[in-house]
Image: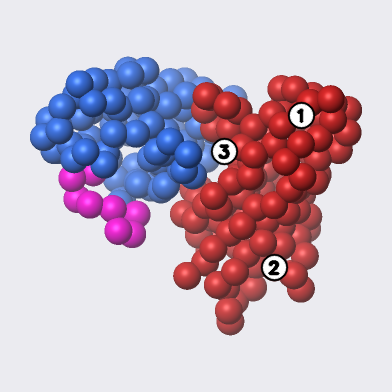
Chain colours: A red, B blue
Amino acid sequence: QVQLQESGPGQVKPSETLSLTCTVSGVSGDSITNYYWSWIRQPPGKGLEWIAYIYSTASTNYNPSLESRVTLSMDRSKNQISLKFRSVTAADTAVYYCARHPPTRPHYMDVWGKGTPVTVSS
Amino acid sequence: EIVLTQSPGTLSLSPGERATLSCRASQSLSSSYLAWYQQKPGQAPRLLIYGTSTRATGIPDRFSGSGSGTDFTLTISRLEPEDFAVYYCQDFGDSPRITFGQGTRLEIK
């Protein structure tokens, strides 16, 4: 079955750019470009915040509150979805999840990765 | 921007009891777009319900969803020990596309 694995640096300094990758496995015979893929984050002890989604390498939609600092991209050859988050502050400390939406239905997310923790600290 | 408000913030019940969790939207939603997730400590969220009332694959039938307009409900008919967790509702809208409620913590009484 489909599995998602997030990876990242663990810790970044304030004002730097955070780069995260979600590697998708178990989509044999299919392409990640056929699905919507989201990034969601969860600060310690708090709720979920949707960041953005990407579909078919070039179609993206961002949370307006984060849009100015975020870029999503997709590498079909590597089965990876990447997130770049610029000018981070302590408020960006969170567990970052990637998640898949069902085919042609961006309404909800049916497969989630385990998440990768990120701490913003000098 | 749609705001989803979940209540109560914390619900204390015993195994075997019935749980009713509420999700209220600041404006009317399409019932096709309301989903519920369960999250246990240290784990990723898990999809429970989509389209207001359709259970996701592998979800026991003690979980049910209902509602329309601005008021939606997740009901757990008879609580099992593994059901104690945090529950989030989620909508798909215009901007932002995906919005979550703040969560309801279901704890053992």
**Magenta-drawn stretch contains B61:** yes
Percent x, y for residue B17? 12, 30
Quadrant of res B86: top left
Viewer-nearest of labels 1 and 2? Answer: 1
Q: Nearer the viewer, residue B30 or A74?
A: A74
Which circle marks residue A79 in the picture? 2
Indicate which label's residue lies in the foreground, 1 or 3: 1
Q: Label 1 marks which chain's residue?
A: A
Question: What type of secondary structure mainly makes up the magenta span?
Answer: loop
Of badges 3 and 2, the one in the foreground is 2
Residue stretch rendered in magenta on the structure:
B56-64
Q: Is residue A75 above or below residue A20?
A: below
Give left or right: position of A33 versus B71. right
Describe the element under mark 1 as helix, strand or loop: strand
Q: Residue at x 70, y 36 (%)?
A: A118
Q: Amino acid at mark 2?
A: Asn
| Residue nearest the observer in this picture, B28 or B79 | B79
Indicate the position of residue A114 as horizontal and vertical percent values. Answer: 54, 49
Q: Residues within 10 Å of mark 3 (few under 14, many from 20)?
A: many
Lateral position of residue B81 relative to residue A98, left or right:
left
Label 3, on which residue? B98
Q: Amino acid at mark 1?
A: Val
